[in-house]
């Protein structure tokens, strides 16, 4: 019985009391930060999208290590922006140093090649022939900028194994996805302002022209605050 009566009191406090308003304020603040972030990301991807018709930009990192049994492991991950598309490339290469092949001989990695390395590079069009070939091949596979390819093969020659994965995503999709939260925030902001101007509760739309400071319907404090508060 006790818990039954306590629950609505707690709920009223949470939803309508000071706690509720603090919570509302915090949620609004988080939403604001997220929508600013989403706007910045959408804007950056739009710039990258435009730039991608003149430049190829790439961020790549690779991690190389020596594994037991004399194996040289290479993990590569790269993000490439070119001609309206983002290409994500992941590769895992396993070179067996005990079994030389005609391409590598028995060469292991230099000590400065081991560990984690990253690189950012930009090339202006026209690309060098070898680079142009790689990317035109990847881009040609896709449908409307989307593609996925996974391949297991030998790294240049037997017996070294390599697994390659390519994913391409068109830039327009990234711009669109990142702009959704910002657009929702903008719509909510416009609605809120218009509600305040008409004397309605910005949260639930209740007519607040007769009320003092809080909405009797949802507990939101708004009508007395200046429009710039939101
Ligand atoms: Zn309300």
Image (cartoon, rainbow, N blue to C red):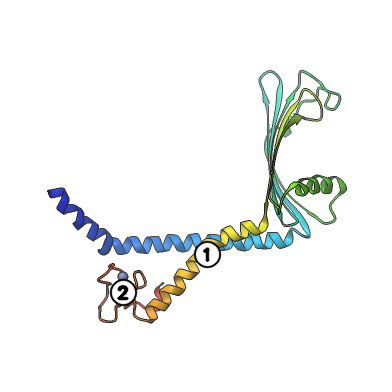
Residue 91 appears in which quarter of the rendering? Answer: top right
For numbered disc 2, what is the local secondary structure? loop
Disc 1: CA contacts within 10 A as few (<14), some (14-19) or many (>=20) = many
Instruction: Tell which of 12 and 102 is nearer to you.
Output: 12
Disc 2: CA contacts within 10 A as few (<14), some (14-19) or many (>=20) = some
Q: Earlier in the sequence, mark 1 or mark 2?
A: 1
Some atom of ligand 1 lies within 8 Å of the CB belonging to the residue at label 2: yes
The vertical placement of 216 against 107, above or below, is below
Residue 134 appears in which quarter of the rendering? Answer: top right
The residue identified by callout 2 is 206
Some atom of ligand 1 lies within 8 Å of the CB belonging to the residue at label 1: no
Instruction: Tell which of 189 and 73 is nearer to you.
Output: 189
The vertical placement of 106 against 204, above or below, is above
Q: Please state the horizontal and vertical placement of residue 112, each as a whole percent of the image.
A: 73, 33
Q: Please state the horizontal and vertical placement of residue 193, each as a whole percent of the image.
A: 42, 76
Q: Please state the horizontal and vertical placement of residue 58, each as a whole percent of the image.
A: 72, 49
Q: Is residue 3 visible?
A: yes
The residue identified by callout 1 is 182
For numbered disc 1, what is the local secondary structure? helix
């Amino acid at each position: 019985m006790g818990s039954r009566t306590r629950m609505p009191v707690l709920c009223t406090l949470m939803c309508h009391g000071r706690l509720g308003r603090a919570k509302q304020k915090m949620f609004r603040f988080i939403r604001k930060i997220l929508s600013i972030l989403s706007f910045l990301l959408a804007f950056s991807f739009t710039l990258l999208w435009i730039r991608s018709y003149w430049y190829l930009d790439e961020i790549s990192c690779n991690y190389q290590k020596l594994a037991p049994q004399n194996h040289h492991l290479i993990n590569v991950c790269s993000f490439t922006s070119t001609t309206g598309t983002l290409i994500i490339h992941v590769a895992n290469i396993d070179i067996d140093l005990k079994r030389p092949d005609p391409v590598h001989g028995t060469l292991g990695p230099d000590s400065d090649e081991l560990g984690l390395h990253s690189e950012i590079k930009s090339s202006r069009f026209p690309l060098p022939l070898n680079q142009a070939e790689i990317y035109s091949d990847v881009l040609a596979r896709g449908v409307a900028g989307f593609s996925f390819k996974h391949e297991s093969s030998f790294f240049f020659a037997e017996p070294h194994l390599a697994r390659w994965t390519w994913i391409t995503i068109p830039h327009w999709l990234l711009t669109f996805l990142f702009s959704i939260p910002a657009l929702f925030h903008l719509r909510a902001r416009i609605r809120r302002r218009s509600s305040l101007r008409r004397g309605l509760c910005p949260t639930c739309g209740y007519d607040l022209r007769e009320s003092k400071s809080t909405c009797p319907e949802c507990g939101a404090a708004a009508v007395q605050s200046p429009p710039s508060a939101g």
